[in-house]
Image (cartoon, grey):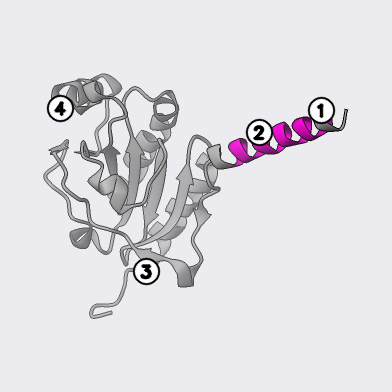
């Protein structure tokens, strides 16, 4: 009897541990003192819908980096919000960059990614990250994942998975309302 109880307790503990490690971190606002400079886009195979972008050259703008892949259902559910933010705020200083990082080998095909961009009517820049270089530079682990970069080039917000669309949009609005950095700062 005692061994059955111990086995049951061990099974519950293992289940809780697995669920804890499987859940994405909460993301959200990064405390001001902890905000780090965003890494540059690394080893991008192909830029689609845009000339190559460099975060250094986007200083003074708010940048939304969206890690996605075209066969991920969570990414597809999340995509309408990203597209809406691009349309709504692109003329107000928001730059949206979808970093397409493939989960499966066939997602590495530029033709397949282009077809998905056309089918999904994506208008924002897409960086094809077949070798996970940008993914690794951001220490990313999830599809979809959103990182907001402020006008000084620091990551100030993140969200992993679906949801928190209202919170993310409010953060976009707040970052756009901030004054750009003074010249020389």
Residue 15 — which label?
2
Mark closer to the observer (1, 2)? 1
Q: Earlier in the sequence, mark 1 or mark 3?
A: 1
Q: Earlier in the sequence, mark 1 or mark 2?
A: 1
Q: Earlier in the sequence, mark 3 or mark 2?
A: 2
Location of mark 1 (residue): 4
The crowd level at tag 3 (other Cα within 10 Å; few <14, some 14-19, many 20+) is few
User: What secondary structure predominates along the stretch shown in magenta?
Assistant: helix
Residue 76 — which label?
none
Q: Quadrant of the C terminus?
A: bottom left
Residues in magenta?
5-20
Q: Disc 4 versus disc 1: distance between alpha carbons? A: 55 Å
The crowd level at tag 1 (other Cα within 10 Å; few <14, some 14-19, many 20+) is few
Considering the numbered disc 2 on the image, is that residue within a helix, a strand or a loop? helix
Considering the numbered disc 1 on the image, is that residue within a helix, a strand or a loop? helix
Q: Disc 1 versus disc 2: distance between alpha carbons? A: 16 Å
Location of mark 3 (residue): 179
Location of mark 4 (residue): 110
Mark closer to the observer (3, 2)? 2
Residue 90 vertical placement versus 74 (above, below): below
Residue in front for this viewpoint, 133 or 165: 133
Q: Residue at x 38, y 31 (%)?
A: 79
Mark closer to the observer (3, 4)? 4
Residue 153 vertical placement versus 184 (above, below): above
Q: Residue at x 31, y 60 (%)?
A: 38
């Amino acid at each position: 009897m005692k061994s059955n109880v111990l086995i049951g307790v061990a099974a519950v503990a293992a289940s809780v541990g697995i669920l804890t490690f499987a859940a994405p971190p909460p993301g959200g606002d990064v405390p001001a003192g902890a905000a780090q400079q965003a890494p540059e886009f690394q080893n991008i195979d192909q830029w689609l819908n845009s000339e190559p972008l460099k975060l250094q050259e986007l200083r003074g703008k708010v940048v939304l980096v969206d890690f996605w892949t075209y066969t991920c259902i969570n990414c597809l559910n999340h995509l309408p919000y990203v597209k809406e933010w691009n349309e709504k705020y692109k003329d107000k200083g928001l730059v949206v960059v979808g970093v397409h990082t493939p989960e499966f080998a066939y997602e590495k095909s530029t033709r397949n990614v282009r077809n998905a961009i056309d089918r999904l009517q994506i208008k924002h820049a897409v960086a094809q990250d077949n070798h996970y270089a940008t993914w690794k530079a951001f220490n990313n682990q999830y599809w979809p994942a959103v990182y907001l970069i402020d006008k000084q080039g620091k990551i100030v917000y993140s969200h992993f998975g679906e949801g928190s669309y209202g919170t993310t949009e409010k953060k976009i609005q707040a970052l756009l309302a901030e004054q750009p950095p003074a010249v020389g700062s």
